[in-house]
Image (cartoon, coloured by chain):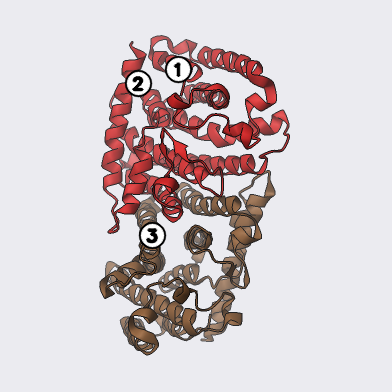
Chain colours: A red, B brown
Amino acid sequence: MDFKEEFKKYQECINDKLKQYIKTQSCPEEMLNHSMEYSLMAGGKRLRPILVIATYQMFKEDIEECIPFAVAIEMVHNFSLIHDDLPGIDNDDFRHGKPTNHKQFNEATAILAGDGLLNNAYIVISKALKDSKKEDLPKKIKIFQEFSNAVDRMIIGEFVDTEFEGKAISEEYLEYIHENKTGALLTLCVRMGAILADAPQKDVDILTSYAEKIGLTFQIKDDILSEEGDEKVLGKPVGNDKRLKKCTYVSKYGLSGAKEKLEELTKEAIEQLQTYHDKAEFLVELAKYIKNRNK
Amino acid sequence: MDFKEEFKKYQECINDKLKQYIKTQSCPEEMLNHSMEYSLMAGGKRLRPILVIATYQMFKEDIEECIPFAVAIEMVHNFSLIHDDLPGIDNDDFRHGKPTNHKQFNEATAILAGDGLLNNAYIVISKALKDSKKEDLPKKIKIFQEFSNAVDRMIIGEFVDTEFEGKAISEEYLEYIHENKTGALLTLCVRMGAILADAPQKDVDILTSYAEKIGLTFQIKDDILSEEGDEKVLGKPVGNDKRLKKCTYVSKYGLSGAKEKLEELTKEAIEQLQTYHDKAEFLVELAKYIKNRNK
């Protein structure tokens, strides 16, 4: 398997679907749509929807069933980026090498575009429930509930993160923040893929454990990149965490400590997937990609 | 029927339920919960959940089934108030006679508390679907879809309203703004009550028409109060619309023109309910209350 090629294929598929779904909404003043589309199509990695689809494909071929949930999670992710970047929260000017939403448009538009994207995720889910076969409703309602709870955890994680800016925190709290702020949504992606594909409970559990571990590695790598990444490649300034005195894995363990933790957790994540052999090849490579990425 | 007493009973019922539902969420840093609870329990009129329950009771007695949806709509309403008050949008300092959320806490907290309330509405709905009898699922999924679409319209309405600040607008646009910003949610309330109570389609249609009319009267009265209300009674400054050059029914038709429109639409709303006689007494009185209220 050529991982890079597979990854790109997934990205293209998701970008197409996102364009379809966002186009169905409309506002007579087109700027709100432009603003939502601007952030949604700004060139994110699409890691979350890829996790949904790749996990689903371990058990089932035809991915149509999981597309709305993959789209919804990417909408939620982008809502959270727009709001986190706002002057009242992180006050960031750049994201993916482009001006952040409130810089490109204005603050009111960015607040409402974020609200709109969060709510649009639920429009997409409600349509998926409406169009569902009766026998698939229980699992989709279960996913709707897990989805809304994971978004809640993400918001709480972001809040606690903001509250602790500039303060010393315990290891416990650092993990709490990231398990919620980043981890909850990444874990949800894998669980959605597995549950939608009718994976046995045993497999849902194993894949959940994999997801929790890569959720942490994702955050640790983010913290490392924020400290020593290349601004041009990252598309955003480096050193902001330090400036804001954010509590990160780097501020807590130092660069080399964070890198050790990253190696260790990636190895543990991959170990979870042993029983699946070739079927899990993409998820194994994805764990390595998260560790090795430079943006 | 003593309308005031009935109204108060409904309010107390809803306040109890809101306290129950908001308590189930938790964040280790309690300020986010405090902040959501602060706005949610700040003493709103509870018009939206009352519309849900009162409409439901026209057809069915036991209101337990409609409570989650009544709670969810009040959460959404309060999310929209918190975000609309933000410095980046209306920059209001007072609401219900108390400091607005970002004034009482801070901007980051207000943004995330708003996000949290919007998302909590969907947590509540997802639980209602999970707990539902199988045979009730189709109508509840239909409501979930109408709910998410109405919230979308509310956000779009708020956006267009913000965009037109200080600009002259056509009658068409003024109606567009209010049909979406306020009307969509009020109409949804009545439709949710009727559909949940298994009202025949004919009744859903009649009640929808009633709701659309009181949605407009509600907004017209708001515009009038914002121009000539009593600050102490309103709990917020009077004249802000003028200061911000907002497009309102008063700026468009003048005070007496707006008042005429208010009378006329209230009459039309009440006429919709004729066939229901006593069963619609509360909704008739509610239409009058909306017209005559002083806050």
On screen, residue A113 versus residue B236, left or right, reads left
Q: Position of residue A130 (x, y in %)?
A: 32, 47
Pointer 2 indicates a residue of which chain? A
Mark 3–mark 2 contact, CB under 8 Å? no
Q: Residues within 10 Å of mark 2 (few under 14, many from 20)?
A: some
Mark sitting on residue A289: 1
Q: Position of residue A90 (x, y in %)?
A: 56, 42
On screen, residue B279 versus residue B45, left or right, reads left
Pointer 1 indicates a residue of which chain? A
Q: Tell me which residue sits at (59%, 40%) in the image.
A: A157
Q: Which residue is mark 2?
A: A7
Q: In this rendering, do the residues under marks 3 and 1 share a single chain?
A: no
Tell me the element at label 3: helix
In this view, the residue in front, B47 or A37, is: A37
Tell me the element at label 1: helix
Task: Choose mark 3 or mark 1, whichever is in front.
Answer: 3
Mark 2–mark 1 contact, CB under 8 Å? yes
Q: Position of residue A2 (x, y in %)?
A: 33, 11
Q: In this rendering, do the residues under marks 3 and 2 share a single chain?
A: no
Three-letter code, disc 3: Phe
Q: CA distance from mark 2 to mark 1?
A: 10 Å
Pointer 3 indicates a residue of which chain? B
Q: CA distance from mark 3 to mark 2?
A: 36 Å
Q: CA distance from mark 3 to mark 1?
A: 40 Å
In this view, the residue in front, A276 or B95, is: B95
Q: Which residue is mark 3?
A: B159
Q: Residues within 10 Å of mark 3 (few under 14, many from 20)?
A: many
Q: Tell me which residue sits at (62%, 14%) in the image.
A: A260
Task: Choose mark 3 or mark 2, whichever is in front.
Answer: 3
